């Protein structure tokens, strides 16, 4: 959804809903249980797609004249992951894309922060995290840089033991 400046009116929506203002060019352009959408360019946004069977991060383009939406880039972990809910994505200062694939297991299970090369779309680094969580999900977000290094912040909910 895109709102006007005062958040008093919805300008358009895209997705699987009765109020969708765009149609998808291909069936594989559709997304499921999506979140963490952010505008990254003119008529372009980044989405964490939980998917039906595996997660992916998509760069979605909108053609407002034709009222179509399509995936212009897709980032998938080198080994498939499927988090049914949660997760987030964003751009790093070097232009690469990151994804956070959290474990929502109540026991200690790995979660992953994965960096994807913007040009090749391939996974180039993976950080494995272990923690036990209750009732919420941590988030990852880009922070400032030191020299040429980009650092990520990792925020744990208060419920984590």
Image: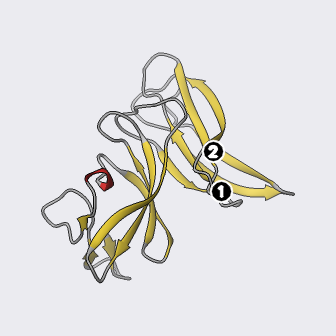
In the rendered image, the quadrant that contains the C terminus is top right
Quarter where residue 93 is shown: bottom right
- Give the image location of residue 55, x and y in percent: 41, 39
User: In the picture shown, does residue 34 fall above or below 137?
Assistant: below
Instruction: Give the residue drawn at x 16%, y 67%.
Output: 19
Query: Element under label 2?
Result: strand
Residue at the outermost left position: 18
User: In the picture shown, does residue 74 fall above or below 51?
Assistant: below
In the rendered image, the quadrant that contains the N terminus is bottom left
Instruction: Give the residue drawn at x 27%, y 65%.
Output: 14
Residue 154 visible in image = yes
Give the labeled residue for mark 2: 115
Residue 161 visible in image = no
From the viewer's perspective, is 152 left or right of 90? right
From the viewer's perspective, is 133 left or right of 94? left
Quarter where residue 99 is shown: top right
- Front in this rendered view, residue 56 or 140: 56
- Give the image location of residue 156, x and y in percent: 56, 37
User: In the picture shown, does residue 88 fall above or below 5?
Assistant: above
- Give the image location of residue 27, x and y in percent: 25, 53
Label placed on residue 121: none
Colour pattern of the rendering: secondary structure
Give the labeled residue for mark 1: 92
N-terminal label among 1 and 2: 1
Q: Are marks 1 and 2 in contact (CB under 8 Å)?
A: yes
């Amino acid at each position: 959804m895109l709102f006007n400046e005062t958040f008093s009116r919805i300008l358009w929506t895209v997705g699987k809903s009765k109020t969708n203002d765009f149609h998808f060019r291909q069936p594989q352009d559709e997304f499921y249980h999506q979140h963490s959408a952010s505008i990254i360019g003119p008529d372009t946004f980044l989405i964490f797609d939980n998917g039906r069977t595996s997660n992916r991060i998509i760069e979605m383009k909108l053609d407002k004249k034709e009222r179509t939406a399509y995936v212009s880039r897709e980032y998938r972990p080198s080994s498939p992951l499927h988090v049914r809910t949660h997760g987030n994505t964003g751009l790093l200062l070097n232009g690469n894309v990151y994804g956070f694939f959290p474990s929502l297991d109540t026991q200690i299970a790995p979660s992953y922060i994965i960096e994807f090369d913007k040009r090749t779309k391939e996974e180039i680094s993976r950080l494995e995290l272990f923690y036990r969580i209750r009732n919420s999900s941590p988030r990852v977000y880009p922070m400032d840089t030191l020299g040429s290094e980009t650092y990520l912040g990792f925020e744990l909910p208060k419920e984590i033991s």
